[in-house]
Image: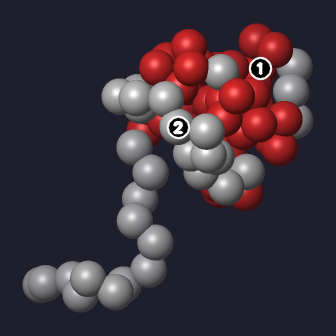
């Protein structure tokens, strides 16, 4: 079976979301807070597997709730 290219949002890498959950638990942040912290901190972006710093949110905070399910 082939999937169409327009079948919805692309999946996020496991390391990205799992790393965000680890950061969130260690720093005691909310979902929105951890996304903002990752956006503002190059070291956290490297930790979750991004290859270069970008001053944009790497994912929407609602992705964390879906990942925890």
Q: Counting other residues with Cα less than 10 Å from the Cα at mark 1, is it few (<14), some (14-19), or many (20 or more)?
A: few
Q: Counting other residues with Cα less than 10 Å from the Cα at mark 2, is it few (<14), some (14-19), or many (20 or more)?
A: some
What residue sits right under mark 2 in the picture?
Answer: 54
Q: In this view, does 36 lie to the left or right of 54?
A: right
What residue sits right under mark 1 in the picture?
Answer: 25
Q: In this view, does 35 lie to the left or right of 15?
A: right
* Identity of the residue drawn at 73% across and 51% down: 61
**Residue 67 in sight:** no
Q: Who is closer to the viewer here, 9 or 45?
A: 45
Whether pointer 2 and pointer 1 mark residues with C-beta atoms closer than 8 Å, the reply is no
* Identity of the residue drawn at 35% across and 28% down: 51
* Identity of the residue drawn at 43% across and 39% down: 14
Q: In this view, does 14 lie to the left or right of 56?
A: left
* Image location of residue 39, percent across then percent down: 66, 35
Give the secondary structure at mark 1.
helix
Q: Quadrant of the N terminus?
A: bottom left
* Image location of residue 67, percent across then percent down: 60, 48
Against 50, is 8 above or below?
below
**Residue 29 in sight:** yes
Display colour scheme: secondary structure
* Image location of residue 60, percent across then percent down: 67, 55
Against 23, is 65 above or below?
below
- Foreground label between 2 and 1: 2
Give the secondary structure at mark 2.
loop
Q: What's the CA distance linking mark 2 and mark 1?
A: 23 Å
Where, by quadrant of the figure, is residue 50 drawn?
A: top left
Q: Residue furthest left?
A: 1
């Amino acid at each position: 079976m082939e999937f169409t290219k327009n079948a919805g949002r692309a999946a996020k890498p496991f390391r990205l979301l799992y790393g965000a959950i680890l950061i969130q638990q260690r720093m005691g942040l909310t979902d929105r807070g951890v996304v903002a912290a990752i956006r503002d901190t190059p070291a956290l972006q490297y930790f979750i597997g991004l290859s270069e710093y970008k001053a944009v949110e790497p994912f929407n905070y609602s992705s964390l709730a879906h990942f925890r399910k």
